[in-house]
């Protein structure tokens, strides 16, 4: 998923953190300008929006409601997508007038020079939502001007779960600390991935075949943010996507890393593949990731 063009100064797809700004738990003060951001206030606003959005998504939807195509039949939008993003932009604009906003459905709002920017996917998994399948999410994150993730929230409206993380403070699920799995192998465990909309991405078929050889069960659920967040919950040993987009990937990336997961790479560039994996299974999975060509996208 991508936004509709971005003015200069907003870079949610930055290639990675600057030297010395390695994004790991316990290193919260290395990002330039981070001290100027009230992350407690930002988290309060973000979790409030997640609760509101979850309720909006859960409301019964008219089966005859309009579903419009954007870039093709497998890229769709509903009135709920637009209503949720509109509300998020209004609230963030009032609470943080200097911040930029990059969303799935509308043009970016450029912030003040050097200010952080928000990334929002109002309904990540719109195809599932539009077809009555209860696996989609609300994704909201805050990034520094250089793209380094500062805060992430991923809400699952159907299970009443909200994943949160602030850089350097750990990951939480409904207010309780959550951690990546202690698994030391892929065998017997779950690997989550997503199509590139309706299509397989390069290297995916080979990766799935190699996972099957290891008796590792692969699942394609239909929401990038929610699938990546399952690594933070310890439910999936690993998760991977063929093209990273900050709008639906950056919040879950931060949450998983703060839960102890290994990210390959640590902060992808736009459209670069991303692998998240429990630390004990990182060597096996990373070797497989590169050997199958999945890392090349």
Image (spheres, rainbow, N blue to C red):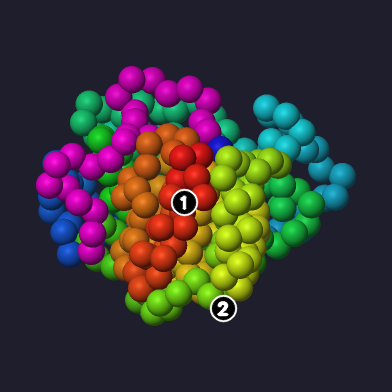
Query: Going from the N terminus, do you reach mark 1 or mark 2 first?
Result: 2
Q: Which residues are magenta?
A: 2-25
Q: Give the image location of residue 252, x and y in percent.
A: 43, 56
Q: Main secondary structure of the magenta part?
A: loop
Residue named by callout 2: 188
The extreme top residue here reads 8
| Dot 1: element | helix
Identify which residue is drawn at 38% across, 36% down: 269
**Residue lying farthest right?**
64
Residue 24 magenta-drawn?
yes
What is the C-alpha distance between the residues marked 1 and 2? 21 Å
Q: Nearer the viewer, residue 175 or 209?
A: 209
Q: Which residue is mark 1?
A: 291
Front one among 16 and 84: 16
Question: Which quadrant of the structure image shows residue 215?
Answer: bottom right
Is 77 in the magenta? no
């Amino acid at each position: 998923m991508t936004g509709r063009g971005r003015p200069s100064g907003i870079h949610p797809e930055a290639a990675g953190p600057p030297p010395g700004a390695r994004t790991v738990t316990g290193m919260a003060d290395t990002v330039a300008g981070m001290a100027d951001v009230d992350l407690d206030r930002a988290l309060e606003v973000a979790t409030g929006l997640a609760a509101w959005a979850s309720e909006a998504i859960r409301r019964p939807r008219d089966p005859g409601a309009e579903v419009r195509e954007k870039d093709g039949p497998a890229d769709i939008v509903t009135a709920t997508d637009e209503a949720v993003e509109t509300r998020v932009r209004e609230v963030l604009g009032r609470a943080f007038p200097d911040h930029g906003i990059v969303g799935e459905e509308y043009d970016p709002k450029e912030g003040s020079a050097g200010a952080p920017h928000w990334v929002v996917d109002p309904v990540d998994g719109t195809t599932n939502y539009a077809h009555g399948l209860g696996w989609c999410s609300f994704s909201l994150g805050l990034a520094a001007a250089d793209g380094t993730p500062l805060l992430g929230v991923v809400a699952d409206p159907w299970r009443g779960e909200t994943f949160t993380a602030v850089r350097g403070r750990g990951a939480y699920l409904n207010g309780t600390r959550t951690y990546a799995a202690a698994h030391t192998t892929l065998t017997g465990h779950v690997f989550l991935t997503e199509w590139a909309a309706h299509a397989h991405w390069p290297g995916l078929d080979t990766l799935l075949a190699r996972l099957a050889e290891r008796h590792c069960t692969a699942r394609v659920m239909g929401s990038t943010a929610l699938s990546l967040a399952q690594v933070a919950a310890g439910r999936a040993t690993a998760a991977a996507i063929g093209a990273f987009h900050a709008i639906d990937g950056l919040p879950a990336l931060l949450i998983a890393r703060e839960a102890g997961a290994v990210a390959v790479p640590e902060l992808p560039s736009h459209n670069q593949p991303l692998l998240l994996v429990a630390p004990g299974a990182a060597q096996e999975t990373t070797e497989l990731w590169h050997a199958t060509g999945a890392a090349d996208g």
